[in-house]
Amino acid sequence: MSVTTKTETKDSTVDSTVWKTVHRVVFPTDGDTDTLPLYVDFNAAQRVVSPEEAGAGATAASVPGTRQRTDFIQGRREMRLPAFRRVSLGTYFNAFPASYWRAHTDVEQVRLTVETDGDATVIVYRSTPRGTANRVDSLHVTQGAPVSIDLSIMNFADGGWYWFDLATGETATTLTNAHWSVPQPEGFEAGTLSVGVTTFNRPDFCVKHLRTFAESPDLTEVLDELIVTDQGNQRVRDEEGFEEAAANLGHRFRLVEQANLGGSGGFARGMQETVKAGKSKYVMLLDDDVLIETEGILRAVQFADFTRKPTIVGGHMFNLYERSVVHNFGEVINEYRFRYESSGDSQNVHDFGASNLRTTPWMHRRIDVDYNGWWMCLIPTSIIKDIGLSLPVFIKWDDVEYGIRAKAHGYTTVTLPGAAVWHMPWTEKDDTIDWQAYFHQRNRWLATMLYSPYSRGGRMPIESMMVDVRHLLSMQYSSVELRLQALEDLLEGPDHLHRNIGTKLPEIRKVRSTFTDAQVSKDLNKFPSVKRLKPPKFGLIPSAPATMPAAISQALSGILNAVRDPREGAVDSPEAVVPAMDARWWRLARLNSALVSASDGAGASWYKRDAKTFRKYMVRSITLHQKLMLRWDELAKTYQDELPNFTSPQTWEKTFAANPAPVVEPKTATDK
C-alpha cells in the first residue's frame, strides 16, 4: 500500500496536485442520540468481528463506556474530546467508502486531512471485504498544524473502507476539521444539480425542504434549482412559512403545480423541467416526506463528478422512527421471479446503534445494485436525454424500471454509502392490499414484459396467480378486483398508460369503497361481538406452514372451505379478531369472517367469506392469466417497441398539458 504522510505548515513543499474534497467529516447538531451512532462510534476499542465472535460477546451498545455523548459535539464540523479519550469515526457517515470509489471512478488514492486545536493522535484503519480491520498508520496532530495522509485505494476491488480514530492526551482537544479528498484530473468540471421533489398534500414537509436547502450554503453552491411539483389540493404555497422560505432560496426555487399524476408523473415533471432549463448536469429525485442529511447530497454530486461514465447515484433509506436503522444496503432484480430483493449478502433492517460499521462484517463487502429507490436518487441529465423520462405508471416500479432501463443502455446505478435520508418504513403499512394493489400488479407485469430474459416471464406469472389465490383465501376481495383490473388494462396495450394516469386513482377508490374488506371503521364498537359457531379442529391455532407440501395442503384445505357456502350465521358476526401483522392467508383461510385491524392501527375492517365471489374471481383470474400467457410474445413486443414513445419528453408534455392543476381556493385565516 502506498502511504504518504505530510504535516501541513507554512514551510511545506508545494504539492502541484489539486485535491478536491469529496467527503467531509460531519456531525449532527440536534442532540439526537438516535442518529449519533451513524456519525461517531464511542466504542473505539472494538474491532470488526465475525458473527461467531459477536454472538459470544457483548455488543457495542452493551460495553461499558460506550454511552452516546452529544455534549462532545460542538458544531457541524467540530467535536471536543476530554483528556485521555478516544472515539472512532469508522461510522456510516464518516468512514470513506473506498471500494465504491475504486469500482466506479479512475481515482487511485484518497487523502485524509485532520485538524485540531490541540495535541491528539489520529489512528488510520482500513478494512478488507471480509470485514477485517487493519491499522494503516498513526499520526500526531498539533494545534494549527493539520496533518494529512495519502492512501491508495487500488486494492479495494471487492470491498473495504478507510476510517480514523481520534485519541487525546493530557488535555482536552477539539477536532476542528477533517475531510477526505481525491486528486482532481486536468480539465475537471464540477457539476451542478436541480432537485425534483414530488408532493401530494404534504406542504409542511416541503417548506422544511426549502428551509433545509436555504440554510445550507455548501448545498446552494451546487444547487441550480429546487423544483417542487405540487399535485395536491393542500397547496404548498398556502403553507405557513412558505413565502419566507421561498424568498430565502430566491431564483433557486421553482414551484410547479399540476394534477395528481402520482410519483412517476411528478418525478417525470422534475426530470423534464431540469432538462429543459439546460443548466444542471444532474437532477436529484427526492421524496417530499424525508429528512435530509445535506452532506449526503453533496457526496452524491461529487461522486458522480468522478465516475468514469454517467452514473445514477442513489442514497440509502433510514427509518424515520428508528433513526439508526437502515432499510437495506442495496437492491437487485431477481430476473426469474421478476421481483426486487436485497443484493448479495446485505441484510434488511440493520441497526447501527446495536452493531456499527466496524462490527458488521457483511457491510465491508461492496454491494452492487440494479436500481435505487427514488426517495433520494441522482440522475445525470445526459442519461435522461438518452433513455427518456419515467414510465407513466403513477406509482410503483417506476424507480425500479428506470434502473433496469438505464442498465440495458449501459449505465450503472450505485447506492453510495454516506448518502442517505430518513423515511417512513414500509413495515408501517401494507400497500399490497389497499388501492395500490392495482399498480403493484400492473407495473410488475409491465416491467417483466419489457425486460424479462425468460420465456413468458419465467416464474412471475405463476406467482401472480398464487398471489390472487392468497388474497382470495384471505377474503381480500377488493385487492383481487384491482389486480384483475390491472391485467385487463395491460391487455389493452400501451395506450392506456398515459390515457388513464390522471383518472385511474379515483376509479380505483370508487371500486374499493364497495367492498367490506376495504371499509375501515375507527369505531370498533360498531362491529358485532366476536362469535364462532364451530371451534377450531382439535383446538389448534393455525400456524405458518413449515414446508412446501404443508403449504399446498393448507391452501387446498382453504380452497375447499372457500368454494362452499358458509354455514348459516357464520358471517353474521366476526369469528375472530386478527391483528394486521397476523392477517396471513393460512390463518384467515380457516375463518368465515374476521375483524382485521388496519396496518396503521387506525381502525379495522370486517372480512366476510363469500363462496360465490371466490368462485367468480378464481375463474376470472385463471382466464386473464391464460390470455396473457397466450398473448405474451405479442404484448411484450408491443410494449418494448412503444417504450421510447411513452417515456419520451414529447409524450409526457402532452400528458402534463392535459392534466393541469385543479382550482383550489386559498386558505383563509380561519382555515389556518
Image (cartoon, rainbow, N blue to C red):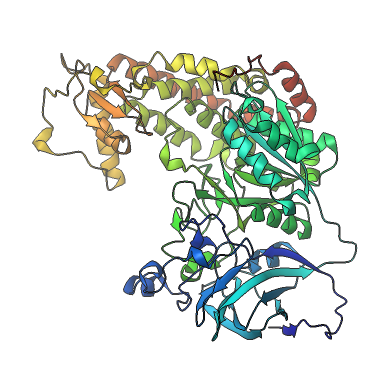
Q: Residue at x 49, y 25 (%)?
A: 626
507, above or below 274, in the image: above
Q: Residue at x 63, y 14 (%)?
A: 665
Locate residue 98, reporting x and y percent: 65, 69
- Front-lying residue, 631 or 413: 413
Q: Residue at x 52, y 58 (%)?
A: 344
Locate residue 156, reporting x and y percent: 64, 72
* Quadrant (top left, top right, bottom left, bottom right) of the C terminus: top right
Locate residue 420, reporting x and y percent: 59, 52
* Quadrant (top left, top right, bottom left, bottom right) of the N terminus: bottom right
Quadrant position of residue 280: top right
Image position of 667 (left or right of 432): right
- Front-lying residue, 287 or 487: 287
495, above or below 645, in the image: above
Locate residue 461, reporting x and y percent: 49, 34
Quadrant position of residue 367: bottom right
126, above or below 21, in the image: below
